[in-house]
Image (cartoon, coloured by chain):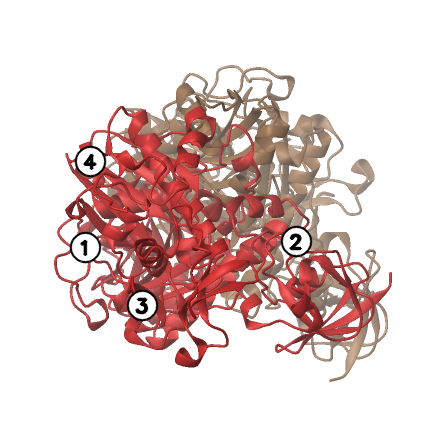
Chain colours: A brown, B red
Amino acid sequence: MEKFKIIFYPDNKTIEAEKGVTILSAAISAGIHINSSCGGDGVCGRCKVILKKGQAVSLPTGRITAEERKKGYYLSCLSVAQSDIEVEVPKESRLDSETISDEDAYMLRLKGIFSEPVDIDRGEAIISEELFIHSPLATKLYLELPKPSLEDKISDLERIYRAIRAIQDTPVLQTGIANIRRLGELLRSSGWKVTVTLGKRNGTTEIVIIEPGDTSGRNYGFAFDIGTTTISGQLIDLNSKKILGTKAAFNKQATFGSDVITRIIFAQEKDGLEKLHHAVIDEMNVMIQELTQENKIDLNDVTCCLCAGNTTMIHLLLRVDPTYIRRDPYVPTANFVPVIRALEAGIKVNPRGLLDCVPGISSYVGGDITAGVLACGMDKTDKLSLLIDIGTNGEIVLGNKDWMISSAASAGPCFEGSGVTCGMRASKGAIQKVKIDPKTFTVEYSTIADTQASGICGSGYIDIIAELLRSGIIDRGGKIDPSLTHRRIRDGEYGKEFTIAFKEDVGTAADIVITETDIENLKRAKGAIYAAAAMLVRHMELSFNDLAQIFIGGGFGTYVDMPNAVFIGLLPDLPKEKFVFVGNSSLIGARQILLSHDAILDAEEIAKKITYFELSVEPNYMDEYVASLFFPHTDLSKFPNVKI
Amino acid sequence: MEKFKIIFYPDNKTIEAEKGVTILSAAISAGIHINSSCGGDGVCGRCKVILKKGQAVSLPTGRITAEERKKGYYLSCLSVAQSDIEVEVPKESRLDSETISDEDAYMLRLKGIFSEPVDIDRGEAIISEELFIHSPLATKLYLELPKPSLEDKISDLERIYRAIRAIQDTPVLQTGIANIRRLGELLRSSGWKVTVTLGKRNGTTEIVIIEPGDTSGRNYGFAFDIGTTTISGQLIDLNSKKILGTKAAFNKQATFGSDVITRIIFAQEKDGLEKLHHAVIDEMNVMIQELTQENKIDLNDVTCCLCAGNTTMIHLLLRVDPTYIRRDPYVPTANFVPVIRALEAGIKVNPRGLLDCVPGISSYVGGDITAGVLACGMDKTDKLSLLIDIGTNGEIVLGNKDWMISSAASAGPCFEGSGVTCGMRASKGAIQKVKIDPKTFTVEYSTIADTQASGICGSGYIDIIAELLRSGIIDRGGKIDPSLTHRRIRDGEYGKEFTIAFKEDVGTAADIVITETDIENLKRAKGAIYAAAAMLVRHMELSFNDLAQIFIGGGFGTYVDMPNAVFIGLLPDLPKEKFVFVGNSSLIGARQILLSHDAILDAEEIAKKITYFELSVEPNYMDEYVASLFFPHTDLSKFPNVKI
């Protein structure tokens, strides 16, 4: 078979590809993560590369403009080399990781549940101390053992068991053979002073690690939220409960498709599952490396990880085939996953460290929602509550401590800053608050961490659409008024667009704009979420007015302007006091579970209690969705307080 | 470093050895198992080889006779090559495995506990059915699961848990990630009909294996007794409780020393632990291979193994450093070893199959004794009982259901047929019963399985010494009367010897004899055991006459002539009705534990209950031992019924 050499810039990576292999596939083999929301079907147009040298051919596509073609742009998923070639992967096509600075993490902290924002990076009290007893997934216990004598001759292992049981009640103690093999020498060389790490493992207690001396002061864990679009990781001091650092990065699985369905299909290809698995664990391992190095923490002192994620993400994390999640009747392989060694999933902490996953509810409502319900305390309140988690899937939970029902709607990643022209994650430089003067169309905005703007995050888009509506720039269908002429309004490649910030003002390569296509995507996303919430409430023969509180979760900003979210019809028309923005409630819940065995038990109860309502088989859902494809809604009587 | 080539015959194996490496070490590296009871110290004289070609030098030794030297004999542990050499390893120096034929196994079955011998190989009822509820270490359960539907959407794993719990109460269920990874495909391709293997694992239940279809009819396990000198293995049908076959072989660790102390010292050498570990598991794997092949059983259907052995043997089996067993205050790393996967110890059955070890009592009283006590039912009886297990170590347990105390004495392997000139294991061809005419010195004997004699087993030696005493051929010190002249009596290499069978009559290479050195070794062995039993009884302020029953265990024959054992002073002078010969009680107990969870619990209770009495620190033990170095004893008043 003929082979061509392909060099990718700016990475300067070379790979040999068989003739006929797409440039996208070659890039993946070379370890270069190109954005490909549609999974390589030539539909999304996000995987553009620039041919610098050599010959290539491409299938026809409307995703490359004439001007781009002149500059050598190709859609990498539709193009193959005809000779040795050199290509550049432009910044906008890349899925590179960004990490959240400490300052960002501070901005992204839990707001709303506490009256005062708490300073997590500066060492103040963090979360829910009053809710759960401090008992982490793995605890360290320093033991000074009595030396054996002719009067006290129990074996080394039983000596350790006896010392542990003198301190705490642990009926079923387990130990792996690896620990036993080192035990005799270890106890004697350490002078009978050792630290045992006790892990909670499926109803038993395991002696996970035995170390010489007193290391009990150094016990760390990671909480992860593994989202379809974004992975967030947090390093926690398991003794003090302090958050030592937080990072977030785009989930590089996006190379293989932007939504879970595309990825499940990809998993069935040769090595597909392996690639998806590695995309997520590699990113997690980078976060673990960076956060431990920044905090000067030895990886061996990281004794456990706790992951929340939707059901597909957890399957892929554990390298479990997700095929049956998307096959009728949509049953996952496991909702309750046993605690395993992190290394069994490829997570590199202490080689004997543990990995636990928050139990999920169904194929489309995962452990991230269980964690979110836990974080919001829905399972403890009498009040009728609604949790709306706005991610790539929009998940909804309705209920209180007596009952809970959930549903999920495919919303797309717009509100996480993906799949929209100038979208970005809610991190430093993201436009998050926007005002537009209805007369002059002057735009005022603020960015996260008040740095120069580099893109727009979810909360920014909510404001922008609300303001464009109020100013009459767009109509209720989302179209820009064709009669308007203004320097901010112009015809772009994908229809009309409105400029939020000019490149000369902010120093970006291009203007920061919102296009009609972006607005269409955002409208579909908000419509899917609103319709799902409405269906669920109606299914329980309730109305939105019966709700006492509505929790809004998701990674779309450090704050959300609730009246604006109502104004565009993302959220129901209720008084703003009823809304509580909880941010990444999945990560908060994961952290609570990492830190408290009580929270594990509560999470199990929540996952068992929540029933699942399948929207796709509900005949009215499509009607409800279509009716939601206006701002705020086709039926304005549903939004009596919105004056438009 | 200069190297020499060494070729070993009859194996025809060649190895390059560095100059200065002993021929014994080279043989070990070549995988040839040479007998070396003393561990290569030049003391035992059992590692002789014959130099066929080339030059070698040897340290001086009294273990090679002038005649042998002429024939080219060298002690391999004291000799090194001076050029490329070729050596022959004669049969008597080899530690080759023998296996017990079905017929032998039948002969070796448990006698005494049952009034009638039961035909274990012919499929009759076997053991103690009335004692323990049938609940093997691993059970198979065939499940026909309801297919998931929109009304019944629990995940695959929970579906299996639910089905198991509908059949039996299993509060803590565990599953490894390997099973979960295969689960989705397996359930669907099998039409939701699967067999789960449930293993008992440290107080929890593990789903060990999940297989398609109904394999519940095929569930097998192995019981092993791992002795210092002999390893016995038994293949059991876990459904029917039938013994499908039994094998025994010399423990090839003997290459590195005949007793546990020598082996513990060897374990500290480079790769020593690894070599000792492999010597035992390789032998076990051969037995597993052979027994499964003979019974046409797939290795994957062998789901668990249960091992009884002394504390050192269990440490070496699990590759746990035994160093501290022989260091004051003699504490093992673990007496209660957790259930692990057999593969973690290198045992090749189903790769996910389990390995459990019978809990031990102390460094010198191991799980083999726990198993023996269980097999004898000492923990269930009011009667004051004594168990004497005659192995390389003689272990003694005294007590009843209310209390038990144990002790151990180093006896040497004579009664197992090792360390005596014509000794052999109690297998086909072993002389097991002997009569000597006191006038003519004519010898009558019978062999196991009534085949031609090839050596003498433990019970044969007991008879021979008793008969030599009765006939006046030896005195109470064990010396052959120097005034006697008879064709059966002659001067041998190591003092006088008495011929039991002439080579021309039985077709052996040499006459089958007992030497004065053999008698001396047997006298020391019986003296150590008797003295230990006497010390233990005295320590509890009891006398032998208080005993209601005495169980005699060990692999020295298919029967033991109890009056003869009393006559030579191995056993105390009590009426023969009080003695019960139980054979390999360790293997019987291991089998009971393999077959019943109740027996596991009982064994744990036994191991916790038995206290250990350390003879070595007891000042009177040496006096008691020295007084026992006569037949039957220095103090004949202790043997009033022995007329000598």
Which tag is nearer the camera, tag 1 or tag 4?
Answer: 4
Estimate the spatial distance between the alpha carbons at disc 3 and disc 2, rounded to whole Å: 40 Å
Give me the C-alpha separation between circle 3 and circle 4: 39 Å
Depth check, front residue: B535 or A628: B535
In this view of the protein, can residue B447 be seen by the observer?
A: no
The residue carrying mark 1 is B112
Secondary structure of the residue carrying numbered label 4 = loop
**Label 1, label 3: how far apart the Cα atoms are:** 34 Å
Res. B295 visible in picture: yes
Q: CA distance from mark 1 to mark 4?
A: 18 Å
Q: Residues within 10 Å of mark 2 (few under 14, many from 20)?
A: many
| Mark 3, residue position | B440
Of callouts 4 and 2, the N-terminal one: 2
Image-based side of A246 in relation to A379, left or right: right
- Would you identify the image quadrant in which residue B546 lies? top left
Which image quadrant is residue B29 in? Answer: bottom right
For mark 1, give the secondary structure. Answer: loop
Give the image quarter of residue B58: bottom right
Residue at 66%, 69% in the rendered image: B67
Closer to the observer: label 1 or label 2?
Answer: 2
Q: Quadrant of the N terminus of chain B?
A: bottom right
Kind of residue at disc 3: Thr
Q: Position of residue A458 (x, y in %)?
A: 57, 39
What is the chain identity of the residue bearing mark 4? B
Residue A537 position, x and y percent, is 29, 40
- Residue type, label 2: Gly
**Residue placed under numbered mark 2 in the picture:** B42
SS state under label 2 = loop
Horizontal and vertical percent position of residue B267: 60, 47
User: In the rendered image, which residue does mark 4 sit on?
Assistant: B547
At mark 3, the secondary structure is loop
